[in-house]
Image (tube, helix red, strand yellow):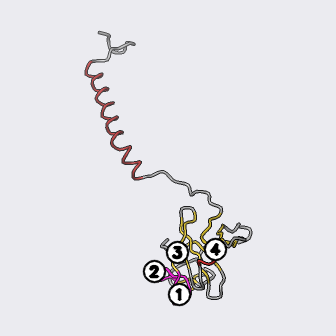
Amino acid sequence: MAQPGERGTRVSRRGVLGWILGGGLAAFLAGVFYPVARYILPPKQSEPKVASVVVGKVGDFPPNGWKIFRFGNKPGIILRTPDGDLRAFTAVCTHLGCTVQYREDFQHIWCACHNGHYDLHGKNISGPPPRPLTPFRVTVTDEGKIVVSHIPEEEA
């Protein structure tokens, strides 16, 4: 056996066994906690890049008619005003993210979660919503299809 302070000291069997058991315990804990951490902190998913969507035909929307549609990962709302204009907005309330709907009796957009109200231009008019709804561009094709798309920021 080597003397203390000399180079090349030998490791005891107990020391090797401690390293093996410690490494096994570390591997076990990593195997338990890694899936838990991945479950608690899911990976961020990017929103699909959607430029525009076809939501229907002009004949599908009588005055005061409306529809919820998917625009990427989020809902949108398209409505036909009593005057016959087509308007589209994001259907996510700016207060807490609930889905809004059109109320024919009020003739404006309404959030049922906390009684938020938006006018037909998407502007918040009462209730807790702090900001207006994000508008979309509505285009009618020659075939009568309604296409909804983002409004570029320089035009908004």
Q: CA distance from mark 4 to mark 1?
A: 20 Å
Residue located farthest toward the top when viewing the structure as drawn? 1
Q: Crowding at label 4, few (<14), some or many (≥20) Cα neighbours within 10 Å?
A: many
Q: Which residues are magenta?
A: 102-116
Under circle 1, the secondary element is: loop
Q: Quadrant of residue 24?
A: top left
Residue 27 x, y percent position in the rendering: 34, 34
Q: Which mark is residue 93?
A: 3
* Three-letter residue code for mark 2: Ala
Residue 56 x, y percent position in the rendering: 60, 71
- Give the quarter of the figure containing the C terminus: bottom right
Among the two numbered marks 1 and 3 on one chain, the one whose residue lies closer to the N terminus? 3
Marker count (numbered): 4
Q: Which residue is mark 4?
A: 135
Residue located farthest toward the left when viewing the structure as drawn? 14
Q: Crowding at label 2, few (<14), some or many (≥20) Cα neighbours within 10 Å?
A: few
Q: Which residue is mark 1?
A: 104
Asked whether 48 or 154 is in front, the reply is: 48
Mark 2 and mark 3 residues within 8 Å of each other at the beta carbon:
no
* Three-letter residue code for mark 4: Pro
Under circle 3, the secondary element is: loop
* Three-letter residue code for mark 3: Cys
Under circle 4, the secondary element is: strand
Which residue is at a point 54% across and 75% down the rendered structure image? Answer: 67
The mark lying in front, picked from 1 and 3, is 1
Among the two numbered marks 4 and 3 on one chain, the one whose residue lies closer to the N terminus? 3
